[in-house]
Each structure stands twice: as C-alpha cells, then as structure tokens.
Image (tube, rainbow, N blue to C red):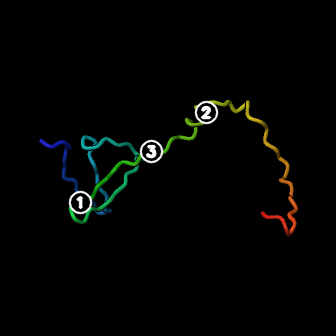
Amino acid sequence: MRDYPTMIVTLDAKRRFNIPAKLAPASPGDQFDATFDAEEDAVILRRVKRKRNWLEVWKKCPVPMDDLPPRSRELPKKVKLSAGEPV
C-alpha cells in the first residue's frame, strides 16, 4: 500500500480539478501553489499557509490600545538644509 492516497481526477471544461474531501480535506478560500513537473508529467499542488486574520493578531497584542500615546496631528516641520551639509 502507498504512503499517500491516490485518486484519478478529471479536468472539467473550465480547466478545473475537483479534489474529493477524502483525498485532501480543504475549505473554501484555501490557497495552493500549483507547479508542473515536465520531467514527471505531473501537476503538484502544495497548500499555502493561510495569512493570519489581522483582528486575531490585534487581540493578542500585549499592549492595550488605551496605553498608546496619542498621535500628533501636526504637520512635520520643514528642516532647512544648507548647501554644505550632507543629507
């Protein structure tokens, strides 16, 4: 018996594969990196790690938003540079 389950899937008219859940469980929105190996004549799909939800990251922030200093609404000061000073 093989280490990985195999199954024959067929390309539809819109050039899409339907992969059964028994073969590889996935949910809508999952992303895959698809590559074609010409030497093996095989299409290889690798699941791409999902980006983290910004709200979940924000909730885990160790500093409460109330403790952050207020943002200045003033425009930045214009600094005059003389011709001899390096930037």
> Label 3, label 1: how many angstroms apart (C-alpha)?
25 Å
User: Residue at point 40% right, 48% down?
Assistant: 48
Tag 2 or tag 1, which sits nearer the N-term?
A: 1
The amino acid sitting under disc 1 is: Ala
Asked if disc 1 and disc 2 are in contact, CB closer than 8 Å, the reply is no
The amino acid sitting under disc 2 is: Cys
User: Residue at point 22% right, 65% down?
Assistant: 39
* Quadrant in the picture for the C terminus: bottom right
Local crowd size for mark 1, using a 10 Å CA cut-off: few (<14), some (14–19), many (≥20): few
User: Which quadrant of the view contains residue 57?
Assistant: top right
Residue 60, percent from left and from top = 58, 31
- Image mark for residue 42: 1
Q: Secondary structure at mark 2?
A: loop
Q: Secondary structure at mark 3?
A: loop
Local crowd size for mark 2, using a 10 Å CA cut-off: few (<14), some (14–19), many (≥20): few
- Image mark for residue 61: 2
Tag 1 or tag 3, which sits nearer the N-term?
A: 1
User: Which quadrant of the view contains residue 62?
Assistant: top right
